[in-house]
C-alpha cells in the first residue's frame, strides 16, 4: 500500500494506530510520535498462536486509544492491558490442557 492510500485510509477515522508512521503524525491535534519511537514490541508470532496474537494486538490498540483520548490514565491503561492479556493467555492455554 502506498503512502497516498495510507493517507486516505487514515481519513476514515478507524480509531486504530496505523502501522505507517509516516502517514499519521497527529490525530485530533495530539502528537503520536511517542507511540512509534520504540517500534513494535509485539513479536509474538513464534511464541503464541495467531488468534491469541491478534487478540493481544487488538487489546493493545484499544488501551492505547483510551490513553490517547484521555479515557484512561496511562498507568490505568497499562494495568488494564496487563490484566486483559494475562486473562487471554490463561484462557488460551487452559483450553489446551
Image (cartoon, rainbow, N blue to C red):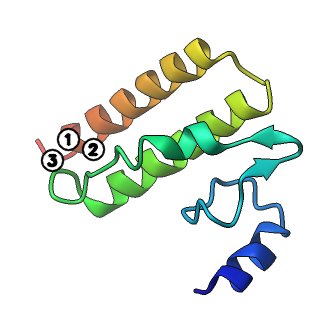
Q: Which mark is residue 96?
A: 3
Position of residue 5 in the picture relative to residue 11 (left or right): left
Q: Position of residue 85 (x, y in %)?
A: 39, 33
State the SS at label 2.
Answer: helix
Labelled pair 3, 1 in contact (Cβ < 8 Å): yes
Q: Position of residue 73 (x, y in %)?
A: 68, 15
Question: What residue do we see at 25% from left, 51% from top?
Answer: 44
Q: Badge 2 local density, few (<14 within 10 Å), some, or many (20+)?
A: some
Q: Which mark is residue 92?
A: 2
Q: Is residue 61 above or below residue 86?
A: below
Q: Which mark is residue 57?
A: none
Location of the C terminus (image quadrant): top left
Question: What residue do we see at 76% from left, 74% from top?
Answer: 7
* Residues at marks 3 and 2, CA–CA distance in whole angstroms: 7 Å
Q: Which mark is residue 93?
A: 1
Q: Position of residue 35 (x, y in %)?
A: 56, 41
Q: Quadrant of residue 9?
A: bottom right
Labelled pair 3, 2 in contact (Cβ < 8 Å): yes
Labelled pair 2, 1 in contact (Cβ < 8 Å): yes
Amino acid at each position: 500500500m502506498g503512502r497516498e492510500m495510507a493517507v486516505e485510509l487514515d481519513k476514515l477515522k478507524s480509531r486504530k494506530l496505523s502501522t505507517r508512521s509516516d502517514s499519521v503524525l497527529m490525530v485530533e491535534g495530539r502528537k503520536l510520535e511517542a507511540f512509534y519511537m520504540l517500534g513494535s514490541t509485539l513479536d509474538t508470532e513464534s511464541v503464541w498462536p495467531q488468534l491469541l496474537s491478534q487478540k493481544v494486538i487488538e487489546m493493545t490498540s484499544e488501551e492505547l486509544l483510551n490513553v490517547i483520548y484521555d479515557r484512561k490514565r496511562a498507568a490505568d491503561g497499562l494495568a488494564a492491558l496487563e490484566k486483559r492479556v494475562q486473562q487471554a493467555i490463561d484462557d488460551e492455554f487452559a483450553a489446551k490442557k
